[in-house]
Amino acid sequence: MRMTLFLTVVLAGFLFVGCAEPKAVDWSQLFPDKDGVVASDTDESVSDDIQTDETMPDEATDEVISDEAGDEVQPDETDTVEPEEDVIEPTDDTTEPLDDTTETEDDALVVDDETPDTVDADTVDIDMTETDTVDIDVVDVDTLDIDMADNDLADFDDDYEVDTPEADIIIPDSDDNMISIPAGQFMMGCNTSLDSNCANDEKPYHAVTLSGYKIDKHEVTAGEFAVCVADGACNNSGDRQYYENSENSSCNLNASNKGTHPVNCVTWYGAKAYCVWLGKRLPTEAEWEKAARGTEGQVYPWGNQTATCALANLSSCGSGTVPVESIEAGKSPYGIYESAGNVGEWVNDYYDSAYYETSPSNDPQGPASGTNRSLRGASWGSGAVNLRSSNRYTYLPTNYSVYDGFRCAKNN
């Protein structure tokens, strides 16, 4: 009975408490720093640095993820937040090149069709393929590289190597490719004491005194003559034919890769026109012979030894010319190249077989008149006997041949 009464009282108390209205709680007073967020005092798993969505940083995905080898690993697209792009403004250090001229790191100057009057650089590349007239005054330039494929007219004031599709052209200078021959006496004609092949037109052996002069170190090349043709000074548009203009492959002017070979197939008029174009002239016979053999009357430019392929380009050595300055052992006492063989050379004189019998002893200029002009030196088609320095032969000035070319001279 007592136990039953006790349980009844306890049960009634629970029911009274459960039906009572709950009291409102001001959470902001309990947690003034966390609006609407409740953390239990006993929940140690909640960190003090919990952040809401509003303060969650976007840059959390900016870090580059790498594997153990150090290679970059692309994060999953669904978890990646694109970083803002860094915009790099260009600086004022970049300088736009000029329209027609570009300076490179190697101090090279590249020039297009509109060429400046004066250029100053270590290397100059000029494109002249689409321009008709180019006048260049080059100052302090070590290398000049010009493409002249379709150029009609070019004026140069110095000596430069030029590459074209057909040949390596050496733009001639008035002095750089010349050798000075000092004034003085030399013995001219066939030296009968050393030479048993003397022809009548080489006699008598006689003393000649010449003023000082200069003569080309090598025979005029096909590349050099081509520049004169391009300039209009050596073309065939006038009354005289200056060179063979057919597609004869034996003529170096029309042949591929023969720019440094001596020009051939040139008439006496073409040879003269080229020399005059450069302010030079053709040498006299006497000037040619002194430069070729020296003053002591030796038979060949190199001495008295019979011509061989080691000394000259003659008929037994092959078929055709060789590049100028190829045969070092065959130079004359003055350093003249290929004055025996390779190509025969036009000189200024009219030819007279008896001229030596009456010629002046000082600066002979050849006969005052005549029909034929003289040539000296013989060619790649000649035998050794014709390469003797005293040998003379002759053609009409209108003739041209695959065997003959020329070199120029000028007064000191």
Image (cartoon, rainbow, N blue to C red):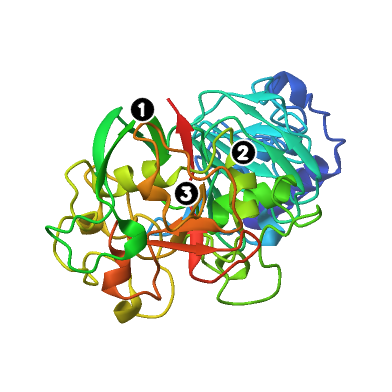
Q: Earlier in the sequence, mark 2 or mark 1?
A: 1
**Residue for badge 1:** 212
Q: Earlier in the sequence, mark 3 or mark 1?
A: 1
Q: Where is residue 4 shown, x and y percent of the image?
A: 68, 57
Q: Is 151 left or right of 274, judged from the image as shown?
A: right
| Residue beneath the point at 67% across and 26% down | 94
Q: Residues within 10 Å of mark 1 (few under 14, many from 20)?
A: some
Whether residues under marks 3 and 2 lie with C-beta atoms below 8 angstroms apart, the answer is no
Alpha-carbon span between mark 3 and mark 2? 12 Å
| Residue beneath the point at 25% across and 33% down | 185
Relative vertical location of residue 251 with respect to residue 149 in this rendering, above or below: below
Q: Secondary structure at mark 3?
A: loop
Q: Is 10 left or right of 256, judged from the image as shown?
A: right
Give the camera-side residue of 218 and 78: 218
Q: Where is residue 220 shown, x and y percent of the image?
A: 49, 51
| Residue beneath the point at 64% across and 21% down | 93
Q: Marks 3 and 1: which is nearer the front?
A: 1
Relative vertical location of residue 7 with respect to residue 92 in this rendering, above or below: below
Q: Is residue 72 visible?
A: no
**Residue for badge 3:** 407
Rendered-image quadrant of the N terminus:
bottom right
Q: Of the residues shown, which amino acid type is indicated by label 3? A: Arg
**Residue for badge 2:** 276
Alpha-carbon span between mark 3 and mark 1? 17 Å
Q: Earlier in the sequence, mark 3 or mark 2?
A: 2
Q: Is 388 left or right of 54, judged from the image as shown?
A: left
| Residue beneath the point at 68% across and 22% down | 91
Q: Of the residues shown, which amino acid type is indicated by label 2? A: Val
Q: Is 313 left or right of 62, judged from the image as shown?
A: left
Whether residues under marks 2 and 1 lie with C-beta atoms below 8 angstroms apart, the answer is no
Relative vertical location of residue 204 with respect to residue 91 in this rendering, above or below: below
Q: Residues within 10 Å of mark 2 (few under 14, many from 20)?
A: some
